[in-house]
Amino acid sequence: MKEEEKLLCLYKAHENFGLLERAPWLTLVGMQNNPNLISIPALKILPAYTGLNTVEAILQVPRARRLLWLEILFNDELDLQPWQNHPEVQDAYQKACQWFTTYRSLIQSVVPRASLPLGSGKIDQREYRRFAETLQFLAPSSPPSHSISK
């Protein structure tokens, strides 16, 4: 059995047992040399908040679905094409666009990313805390630029 076939069998076996949501590294084994293998979009935020590592898993959990807009807002490497017709993904995308329109300068100063389309409509300011916590989570840590002297 070729190396690529072994990896694909391993992937399918783990997929059947639901282990991919808990062990994303399994999908990365051999991906660099095997572009034909199925790839899973790289989530950056929701694994830390929910422990889930795939969009499929996120769509199964109501709490995770409510946070999907943050992943879309801050992760420009996420490919949502397979789920573009899913109503909850569409809602999360629209919400991310609205927040990006409102806080574009702040977001791009902390987390460089490609622009999202301008979103019309108002954002729910009650979610600002979640937005700010996520932005802080993603902000590169750096030492203070100056010290205070007495």
Image (cartoon, helix red, strand yellow):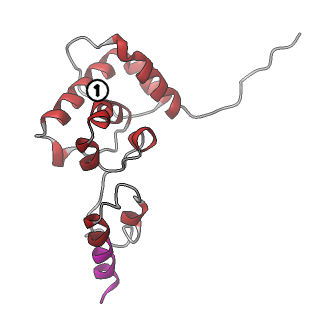
Tell me the SS state at disc 1: helix
Residue 24 placement, left or right of 72: right
Amino acid type at circle 1 is Ala
Residue 142 placement, left or right of 68: right
Residue 112 placement, left or right of 122: right
Q: How many labels does the image show?
A: 1
Look at mark 1 in the image and give the residue it sits on. Answer: 96
Quarter assignment of residue 85: top left
Instruction: Residue 47: give x, y in percent of width and height.
Output: 41, 44
Task: Give the residue at x 17% y 49%.
Answer: 82
Q: Does the magenta stretch include residue 9?
A: yes
Instruction: Residue 11: give x, y in percent of width and height.
Output: 31, 70
Task: Give the residue at x 30% y 34%.
Answer: 68
Task: Give the residue at x 18% y 34%.
Answer: 88
Q: In which quarter of the image is the N terminus?
A: bottom left
Q: Is 54 in front, or is 110?
A: 54
Q: Is 92 in front, or is 12?
A: 12
Vertical side of 78 occupied by 134: above or below: above
Vertical side of 22 occupied by 146: above or below: above
Q: Quadrant of the C terminus?
A: top right
Quarter assignment of residue 12: bottom left
Instruction: Residue 6: give x, y in percent of width and height.
Output: 32, 81
Q: What stretch is highlighted in magenta?
A: 1-10
Q: Main secondary structure of the magenta part?
A: helix
Quarter assignment of residue 4: bottom left
Q: Does the magenta stretch include residue 139?
A: no
Instruction: Residue 120: give x, y in percent of width and height.
Output: 20, 15
Disc 1 crowd rating (10 Å Cα; few below 14, some 14-19, many 20+) is many
Residue 121 placement, left or right of 110: left
Task: Give the residue at x 36% y 67%.
Answer: 31
